[in-house]
Amino acid sequence: MADSPVNLSQSLNSTGTKVFNKEAVAIGAWSSDLPKVKRSWKLPPDGWELIEPTLDELDKKMREDETEPHEGKRKVEYLWPIFKIHNQKTQSIFDLFYKRKAVSRELCEYGIKEGCEDKNLMAKWKKQGSKDLCCLRCIQTRNTNFGTNCICRVPKSKMEVGRIVKCTHCGCRGCSGWHP
């Protein structure tokens, strides 16, 4: 099979969209031919051009992390950079809307609708004691062995001295008010 050339032919299906054969998809030949992810047909509100470069840069970073090889990492570890970038995207719009009051509610809701930020995470950040929350999985008790929060939610003062902890869900080293 190594001597046979790979057929990268394209064809149009009944709806007129491009269809690639299995070999082309297997080697990733389709990625350069497809357009970027499109936003909705509704025009973005005023101010979108101010935050769009930041979001596009974080999307580009996320794509790089998704394609980065993950040999030698544990199964959960290769998702940590993606969680971190998702958190950064949400945090950037949260700061602009709730803290600096630099963008409108309409722009914030547009970003939520387009999938640029996580509305549930933003809702938790508004509550007292959760402003540094790293991800929603860390406060969900149903995914833990003993029905408690994640280890990263334990305050640093309650931990034994010198112990370095990393969350298995997102790689956080402590989001209960302590930052490295």
Image: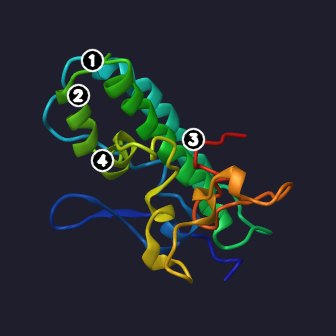
Pointers 2 and 1 in contact (C-beta within 8 Å): yes
The residue depicted at 39 percent of the width and 49 percent of the height is: 34
Disc on the earlier residue, 1 or 4: 1
Which label belongs to residue 178?
none
Identify the residue under disc 3. Answer: 61
What's the amino acid at mark 3? Lys
Is residue 115 visible in the rendered structure shown here? yes
The residue depicted at 63 percent of the width and 64 percent of the height is: 151
Disc on the earlier residue, 4 or 3: 3
Pointers 1 and 3 in contact (C-beta within 8 Å): no
Q: Where is residue 14 in the image (x, y as percent from the top left)?
A: 16, 67
Q: Is 1 located above or below residue 19 in the figure?
A: below
Secondary structure category for the residue under label 3: helix
Q: Position of residue 43 (x, y in %)?
A: 15, 29
Q: Farthest residue toward the right?
A: 162
Which label belongs to residue 47?
1
Which label belongs to residue 107?
2
Secondary structure category for the residue under label 4: helix
Label 3 Cα neighbours within 10 Å, binned few <14 / some 14-19 / many ≥20:
some
Label 4 Cα neighbours within 10 Å, binned few <14 / some 14-19 / many ≥20:
some
Q: Where is residue 147 in the image (x, y as percent from the top left)?
A: 49, 79
Pointers 2 and 3 in contact (C-beta within 8 Å): no
Is residue 8 visible in the rendered structure shown here? no
What's the amino acid at mark 1? Gly
Q: Position of residue 107 (x, y in %)?
A: 23, 28
What's the amino acid at mark 2? Leu
Disc on the earlier residue, 2 or 4: 2
Identify the residue under disc 4. Answer: 119
